Amino acid sequence: MTAYFQRQLADYVEYHRDPWNCAMHVLGIILLFLGAILPLSMWPISLFGAQITVATLMALPVLIYWLVLDTALGLAIVGVAVLLLAAAAMIADHASVTGVWITTAILIVTGVASQIVGHQVFERRQPALVDNPSHLLLGPIFVMAKLFIALGLRHDLAAIIGPAAPLSASLHPGDRRSEPHAHS
């Protein structure tokens, strides 16, 4: 894990303390990634004799970025991305062009809405990317880091972003009973 990644993650976590907000981000990130690659999955290209889609080609730079930030987390994200690229290809193969674009719109609107609800209702704070646009690329690796922590695989990450709290720790939107309270 690079020092740059540690600083970025420490800053990002300040905007993502509520477990319900994190859950909304899991949903939103998956839907937004699928929505971004779905229409690009309709265009096959030949690259060095292999058939791929524009979606795969366009996803490669960000997948490489995540691998550079943290190899283990990056590899896990690549695994999820492969599944989402396969799902997008399957949808693109079986749906009409209109169907693909309608599905894309629904995925993007739902993904963005889940992010907004997570921040406005549960976190009660603006999204991190408003203050730092580079945080747009940190969401997927943050979610994967939380999963690794929950599985007990990355204590070094837990030291930066804290332990993964179960969703039951937050009983109501904005409820912070699971956090220690300062006494005056």
Image: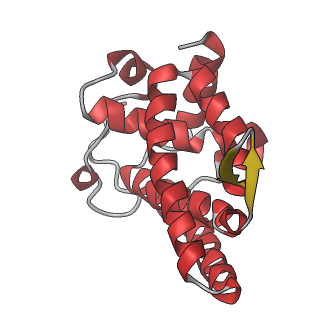
* Closer-to-camera residue (82/177): 82
- Does residue 163 appear to the left or right of 29 in the view shown? left
Question: Quarter of the image holding residue 63?
Answer: top right
- Residue at point 53%, 14% (across, down): 1
As rendered, which of 56 and 69 lies closer to the eye? 56
Q: Is residue 3 above or below residue 58?
A: above
Q: Nearer the viewer, residue 71 or 153?
A: 71
Residue at image position (44%, 50%) is 22
Question: Image point 75% across, 43% down: which residue?
Answer: 47
User: In the image, 154: left or right of 84?
Assistant: left
What scheme was used to colour the molecule? secondary structure
Q: Position of residue 158 (x, y in %)?
A: 37, 23
Q: Is residue 167 visible?
A: yes
Q: Is residue 182 visible?
A: no
Identify the residue at horizontal 66%, vertical 16% (top origin).
Answer: 4
Q: Position of residue 8 (x, y in %)?
A: 63, 26
Closer to the camera, 29 or 63?
Answer: 63
Image quarter in which the C terminus is found = top left
Q: Could you say where residue 92 lies in the image, as x and y percent from the top left?
A: 60, 73
Q: Residue furthest top?
A: 3
**Residue 54, quarter of picture:** bottom right
Residue 83 horizontal/vertical position (percent): 45, 53
**Up-down relation of residue 184 to residue 39 (above or below):** above
106 vs 160: above or below? below
Tell me: 119 left or right of 22: right
